[in-house]
Amino acid sequence: MAGIEGLSVEGLSKRYGDIQAVDDLSMRLHPGGLIGFLGPNGAGKTTTMRAIVGMVRADAGTISWAGQTLLSGARYDHEVLGGLGVGYMPQERGLYAKMKVGDQVRYFGRLGGLSASEATANAAQWIERLGLADREDTFAQDLSGGNQQRLQLAVSLVHEPALLILDEPFAGLDPVAAETMRQIIAERAEQGAGVLFSSHQLDLVEDLCEDVVIIADGRKVAEGAISDLRAASPVRELRVRWAEPVLGWAPLTGSVVSADDHSAVVHVPAGDDLDAAVDHALRAGTVSEISLSPPSLADTFSDLVIADGATTGAAAQAGHGGVS
Amino acid sequence: MIWLIALRELRTRGTSRSYLLITAALFVAAIGMVVLLTRLSGGDDDPVEFTIGLEGEGLPLAEILGSPPEGFDPTVVTDGVSTEALETEEIDVVFDGSSLVWKGTPDRRLDTFLRSAISQAQVFGEAKDLGLSEQQLGQLLSAPEIEEIRLDGSDDNGDIDLAAAFIAAIATFLLLQMWGAFMMMGVIEEKASKIVEILLSHVSANQLLMGKVLGFGILAVTQMLIVAAGLLMALLLAVDIEVPGRVWALIPLFVVTFLFSFAFYSSAFAAVGSTVSRQEDATQAQLPAMLPLVVGYMIATIGIESPDSLIVTIASFVPFTSPIVLPVRTTLVDVPIWQIVLALAILAGSTFLMLRFAARIYRNSLLRTGGRVPFKKAWLGGDTDPSSA
C-alpha cells in the first residue's frame, strides 16, 4: 500500500448481524480528486465513510491515505488518522450547544492537529468567511438554523484537512449555504485535498464533480468519470422540440419518456441507428431544438441501481428494510 | 489529544455557574460542619453556670463553692433566700443544710457535683472540729495521681475521629455520585447532540473517555481540595478542637484513594451513560453504577458504628465499596499498613480494568442511537447497525 497517494480502500467489508452493509468495496481517491459517493438509502455509504474515519470497526479490508495504513484487517490505527488531518462531516449534524462559536471552532481546530495559534488564526478566517464574525461569542444553541449549519461547516473544515469525508453535506442546507458549501468543496479540491462526499442531489453532484462511485447493497456497481458512465449507458436520450404542434408522432425506435404537442423525450437504445432516429424526428416538423446525448446522471444512476437490484434478488433488498 | 479534551471540560465546566456554586456551597458546608462540631464537643467543656441559694445550715457550703473545680461556675446567693425565691428569683437550686430544692428535674452533672461538694463541706467542718489544719486536711484529701491507660489506643479525640470518618464518607460519596451524574450527562449530551461523530473522527473513543475522566477528575479533585481547605482552615481556627495527628497523616491516603475511586466510578458512569441517547433514560441507566456506590456508603455508615466488623473489613478491600469504606476504616481503627497497601492495589488494578471495560462499552455504544443499548450488546459490539440500534 505504501507509495500510493491519496485514499485507497481495498476489500472493505462490514456486516451487521444478517446484513452485509459493505461488501468487498474498493475505491481510490487522489489528492485534488472529488468523488461523489452515490447509492440508495441503506446502500452502505455511511458505514463506508465511518469505516474510513475509524468510527466503525470494519470486518476486513485495508484503508490507507498518503501511503499510511489506517485500516489493516480489522485493526484501525487512530494515531495515524489523528496525524493526517481528516475532515469528517457526519450526516447527523452536531455541535456543543453550550459552547461559544469561536471556542467551538478553535477546539475542533486543535483536535484536528493545529497548534493553538494556528487554530486561532484558522478559526478567525473561517468564521469570517462563513459570515459568523458577529456571532463569535454566541452559544451554538442560540444561533439560527442556517448559522448552525455554517458553524458545522467551520468545525469540519477549520483544520483544513487534506482528506474530506462529507456525508450528505448538502442535506438540509438553505440555497445560500448550499452554494457556499459547493464553492468550498470545489476550492478544497483545487487546493489539493481529496474530497469524498455522498449526496442524493444528483444534479449537484454532476455539477460539482467529475467522478462518482455508485454502490448498492454494500457493493460497488459502478465507478469512474460521470461522462464515461453516462456514455456507457445502454440508452441515448433524444430531446426534440418543434416550432409548431406535431400530433401523433411516434419515434422510429426506443421508448417515449415524455411527450406533448411540441416536444418529446425518447430513450433510444445506444446500439440502434441513432442517425436514423434523429432524422425521423427532424422530418416530423420544423425543429427548434434537438439533442442526442447520454442520459443524465440521475437516469444513469437509477438504471445502474435497478439493474443491480434485479441481479442481487429480492432477499437482499428486503434485508435492508430496517437500516437507514 | 486527551489533554485537549480534558482542557475543554475544564474550561466549559470549570467556569460554569453550577460548578462555582456547588464548590462554594461545599466550602461553606465544610466550615459549617466544623462549627457544628465545635458546638457539640465544646458544649462539654463550657463551665456549668448556676445560681445557688444557701440558707440556714447550708451556708457553710459557700466556702467550698468559692473555689469550684473546673467545669462549674456557681453564683452563690445568701441574702433572703427561701424556697419561694426559686419561683421568682434567678436561682436554680436552694440548699438549707438537709435538702436540695430544685425547680424541676435537676441537671445530673450539677446534682452530682453539689452532693460531693456538700459531703466535702461536711468533712471540712468535722476536720476543723478535730483540730486539723487546712494543710493537713489538704494532704489527707488529695487524690493520688492515677494514670489512665486505654488498651484500644483510643483517646479523648474519639469524637474527632468519628467526625473525620463521617466527613470522609459523606464527602467521598457526594463527590463520586455528583461527578458520576455530571459525567453521564456530559456523555449523553455529546451523544444526543450527535457531535460525538465529529469527535470520533479526530480521536478514538478511548481517548475521548480518558480526556473526560482526566478533565472531570481535575475539577473534582480541585473541588475536594477546596472543601478540604475550608475544613482545615475552620479546624485550625477552632481552638477547641485538636485534630489528632493520625487524622492528618491519613489525608494523603484519602487523596490517593479518591483519585483511583474517581477514575473507577466516573468511567463506570461514562459507560452506562453511553448506553442511552436521551437524558430521560439516564436515571434508569445509572443504576448499575449507582447501586454499588450506595451500598458502599451504607457499609461506611456501619463502619462508623463498628469499624471492626467483618463486613466493613471485607468492604474495605472490594473495589466497588472501598472508595468510601477504606477511609472510614483507616480513620477509626489502626489498619495494618499491608492491608492499606493491598486495598489500594486492588482498587488501582480494578480501576485499570474498569477503564478498559468502560472504554469498550463506551466505544460500542456511542454510535448507537435510539433505545438503551443492552450491556451484552455494548460489550460484544458490532452486532447490529449502530445507526438503527
Image (tube, coloured by chain):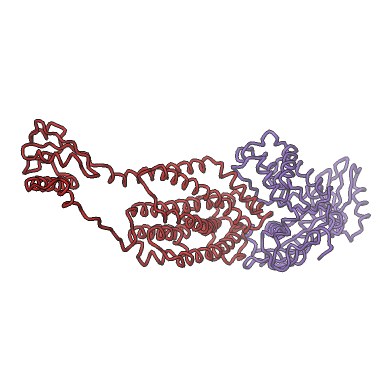
Chain colours: A purple, B red
Image position, residue B73 (x, y; %): 22, 39
For residue A224, which quarter of the picture?
bottom right
In the image, residue A285 lies at what x, y percent?
90, 44
Closest to the observer: A113 or B224?
B224
Horizontally, is B295 left or right of A274 in the view?
left
Image: B278 above or below B381 = above
Q: Is residue B87 left or right of residue B257?
A: left
Q: Is residue A138 left or right of residue B326?
A: right
Identify which residue, B380 or A11, lies in the foreground.
Answer: B380
**Picture residue at 24% right of the left edge, 44% below the top:** B71
Q: Is residue B388 above or below residue A172?
A: below
x, y percentage for residue A142? 60, 37
Q: Is residue A137 left or right of residue B111?
A: right
Q: How many marks?
A: 0
- The residue depicted at 67 percent of the width and 37 percent of the height is A136
Residue B246 visible (yes or no)? yes
Q: Nearer the viewer, residue A260 or B107?
A: B107
Quadrant showing the C terminus of chain B: bottom right
- Residue at the location (90% across, 49% down)? A281
Please, is residue A213 above or below residue A142 in the view?
below
Q: Is residue B272 visible?
A: no
Task: Please state the horizontal and vertical placement of residue A250, each as a whole percent of the image.
Answer: 85, 52
